[in-house]
Amino acid sequence: MGGYVVALDAADEGEILNLAVAPGGRRIGLGRALVEAILGVLKDRDVSHVYLEVRESNAPARALYAAQGFREVGRREAYYRRPVEDAIVLRHDA
Ligand SMILES: CC(C)(COP(=O)(O)OP(=O)(O)OC[C@H]1O[C@@H](n2cnc3c(N)ncnc32)[C@H](O)[C@@H]1OP(=O)(O)O)[C@@H](O)C(=O)NCCC(=O)NCCS
């Protein structure tokens, strides 16, 4: 049971590239803890805006990010493959 988050930063902008929790360990707060932790790390690195893309249909991730204060700022049409789907672009401001 575990999970991971991958992010990068450049100047005052950060991006969460990937986030996942093992299926057997979901819904016990690990995803939220990973997002809170990475937002703290990025803030300490003077990042003031954090972006990410999420599949439009990914309700669990979208609920998690919304609860953490991310808001929708854009859409990338047909961004994903297998299956083709739009990405929703989210932003968190420190
Ligand atoms: C998205 C993901 C990381 C969430 O991890 P998690 O450890 O289960 O999340 P948490 O237990 O911390 O849940 C935090 C909040 O997210 C939301 N959430 C999580 N799973 C949910 C689900 N299946 N349905 C609805 N909301 C959900 C809820 O608001 C939840 O708060 P609550 O438990 O108090 O209701 C996990 O489902 C996952 O790894 N999914 C596959 C990979 C993925 O989609 N990554 C994101 C790519 S952008």
Image: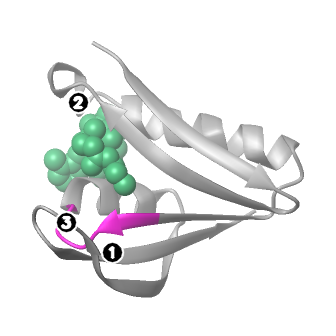
Indicate which disc, 3 or 2, sits on the residue closer to the N terminus: 2
Residue that appears at 44% across and 40% down? 32
Read off the residue under disc 1: 87
Residue that appears at 10% across and 66% down? 83
Q: Which x, y percent locates residue 80?
A: 26, 68
Residue 50: quadrant of the picture: bottom right
Q: Is residue 55 magenta?
A: yes
Read off the residue under disc 2: 26
Locate residue 39 relative to residue 2 in the image: left or right: right
Q: Which x, y percent locates residue 29?
A: 36, 31
Q: Residues within 10 Å of mark 1 (few under 14, many from 20)?
A: many
The answer to whether the residue bearing label 2 lies less than 8 angstroms from the nearest atom of ligand 1 is: yes
Relative to 32, does residue 54 appear above or below in the rendering? below
51 or 72, nearer to the observer: 51
Q: CA distance from mark 1 to mark 2?
A: 23 Å
Read off the residue under disc 3: 81
Residue that appears at 23% across and 30% down? 26
Give the amino acid type for the residue marked by disc 2 in the picture: Arg
Locate residue 89 relative to residue 93 in the image: left or right: left
Quadrant where ligand 1 appears: top left
59 or 78, nearer to the observer: 78
Relative to 51, does residue 89 appear above or below in the rendering? below
Q: Which residues are magenta?
A: 53-58
